[in-house]
Amino acid sequence: MNNKRQIIQVRDATTLAQAAAQRLIARLEANGGRAAVCLTGGAGPQPLYRLLASDTYRSRIPWQHVHWFIGDERFVPSDDPRNNMAVARALFLDACAPPDNIHPIPVQAGTTRDAARRYEIALQTFYGSNRLDPARPLFDLVLMGLGPDGHTASLFPGDAALDERERWVVSVARASVEPQVPRVTLTLPALASCREMLFLVSGENKRDILARVLSGESLPAARVRSRGDTVWLADAAALPEIRDDA
Ligand code: 6PG
């Protein structure tokens, strides 16, 4: 496991989306074959999602070869505006990606546990094994956000999901932030199985929690690491000063 993280400061939310798009494209180019990207929810990635559908970036993505997953989901119908994959679909996937390459968490399953089990099987089928091989990452890129309480994906401080070592996907009964609906989330080992984990952190309202993460507090967002590269992209409002204690 590579425990280091790289911190990159950019000017603002627009530059952050551009830098993220460049990194995504670089990972797809490095793969050259069938690639997998794990998306994230929340407001943070939305400028990036819009950008990927724009003329400049759309033509640079080999859509037929890229598969799109999601790191966590709110257990609401697939057309609910709070549904993370619904947002990604509306902003870029439906316009750009072949439908078979879009892999939502099945919120139509009866329970969050069923949905978690089914998504785990979908990931294992895609990967071709139910054991993660450190030499063969599940994802090329995993996008992550930072919640106000230090959560990431739907891994909330103090929740048992954080200690899961075997399962790839679990259900989370209660979210400690809005929307307070049950969730389904990938676990630390599944998220870690990537060539690059890319956190997107933008805006002044992230400044305090980002400082806590970077100061070493044991928050979920600080605990999750890629087996490959872990990169934090933050804008100047969220990270006024670059720290050297990463
Ligand atoms: C979710 C997310 C969650 C999100 C953070 C940051 O489903 O809510 O995946 O982990 O990334 O809460 O969200 P914002 O970008 O909206 O601040």
Image: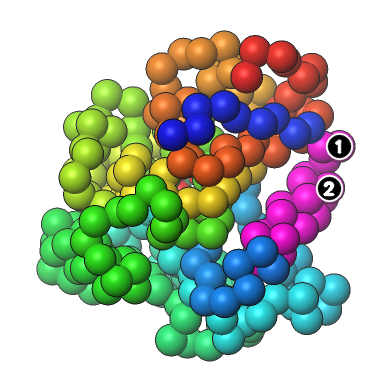
Q: Are marks 1 and 2 in contact (CB under 8 Å)?
A: yes
Q: Give residue 11's mark.
A: 1
Cα separation, mark 1 vs mark 2, equals: 6 Å
> What residue type is disc 1 on?
Arg
Q: Which residues are magenta?
A: 10-28
What secondary structure is the magenta-colored segment mainly?
Answer: helix
Image: 212 above or below 181? above
Across the whole image, how many numbered discs are drawn on residues? Answer: 2
What secondary structure is marked by label 1? loop
Considering the image in quadrants, where does the N terminus appear?
top left
Q: Is residue 87 magenta?
A: no
- Please name the residue shown 38% across and 53% down the image: 72
Image: 97 above or below 79? below
**Dot 1 surroundings within 10 Å: few (below 14), some, or many (20 or more)?**
some
Q: Give residue 15's mark.
A: 2
- Please name the residue shown 71% across and 54% down the image: 23
- Return the x and y of residue 36 as percentages of the image width and height: 50, 67
Q: Is ligand 1 less than 8 Å from the beta carbon at label 2?
A: no
